[in-house]
Image: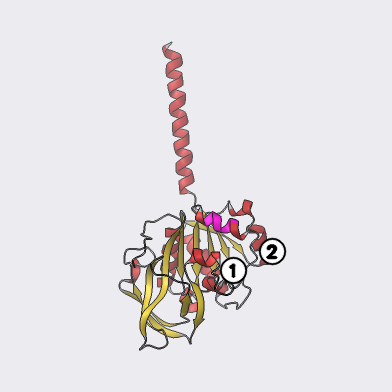
Amino acid sequence: MKAPIISLLAKSVALLLAIGTLTAHAADQPKKILLVTVTKGFRHSSIPTAIKVLGDLAEKSKAFTIDIAYNDADLLAKSTPAMLKTYDGFIFANTTMTLPLADKQAFLDEIKGGKAFIGMHSASDTFHGEGNKVDPYIEMLGGEFLTHGAQAGVECLVQDGKHPAAKHFGEAFCIEKEEIYLLKNYDKTKVRDLLTLDKHPNKKKEAGHFPIAWCKDYGTGKVFYTSLGHREDVWENKAYQEHILGGIKWALGLVPGESAPLAK
């Protein structure tokens, strides 16, 4: 009877080793992200630069790959419930207004169910509500574009020096010229601020709390947003690239970082 028992044990060990190898291999595989660059309003000239930068970051980091939706047809084909399940996360890079998602609720449900969402600049100028109604997309994101003034130089103050999207900045990130958004439907008690201004970007004497970048939980999913990224030279800035790479890796669950709001 010993031989069959030994044989059974050997097969069990071999099966466990095979499962372990497959699990480790799966863990080493880069995450798959759908990068959306579709616009229905203003189209930023920096979008081609954004595509190149994100592609370079994906290739160099080996952390993720990108599948790009360039136009309506791409987005409709890649945002069906079945296709959405094939992605680990979604990036909206300078998207604007109402996008032609095949199934918007399924898209939000995928994020809420544990996937990543990363928004740059005018991702907050996307899916506006009607009247006083806040669009569910904006509720997921955490803030909505209201207006902006002339491009200006700003000192973005770091609020979480340990977060992977901000720790490389030190105490502040200074930008010589950028289009800074003023937001609505933003609540600092519902997001974790990463970068803020303590004065109005154009009216320098007007003190206040002006959010620039944050992260938050959405169900079991993770959301990272930065309002920076209007200009080509901002996208080409190495510090900005490290900012968005840290945010992407955090949202994908590849690096640790807190998401609880700092404000009570």
Total marks placed: 2
Image location of residue 28, percent across then percent down: 46, 48
Secondary element under disc 1, as helix, strand or loop, is: loop
Q: Relative to 145, does residue 140 appear above or below in the rendering? A: above
Front residue of 40/233: it is 40
Residue 108 lies within the magenta run: yes
Q: Residues within 10 Å of mark 1 (few under 14, many from 20)?
A: many
Image location of residue 24, percent across then percent down: 44, 43
Visible residue check, residue 98: yes
Read off the residue under disc 2: 73
Residue 127 lies within the magenta run: no
- Quadrant of the rendered image containing residue 9: top left
Read off the residue under disc 1: 37
Visible residue check, residue 231: no
Location of the N terminus by quadrant is: top left
88 vs 13, left or right, is: right
- The overriding secondary structure of the stretch rendered in magenta is helix
Model colouring: secondary structure
Image location of residue 210, percent across then percent down: 40, 77
Q: Which residues are magenta?
A: 106-111
N-terminal-most mark, 1 or 2: 1
Secondary element under disc 2, as helix, strand or loop, is: helix
Front residue of 206/93: it is 206
198 vs 86, left or right, is: left
Q: Which mark is residue 121?
A: none
Q: CA distance from mark 1 to mark 2?
A: 12 Å
The amino acid type, in three-letter code, at marker 1 is Thr
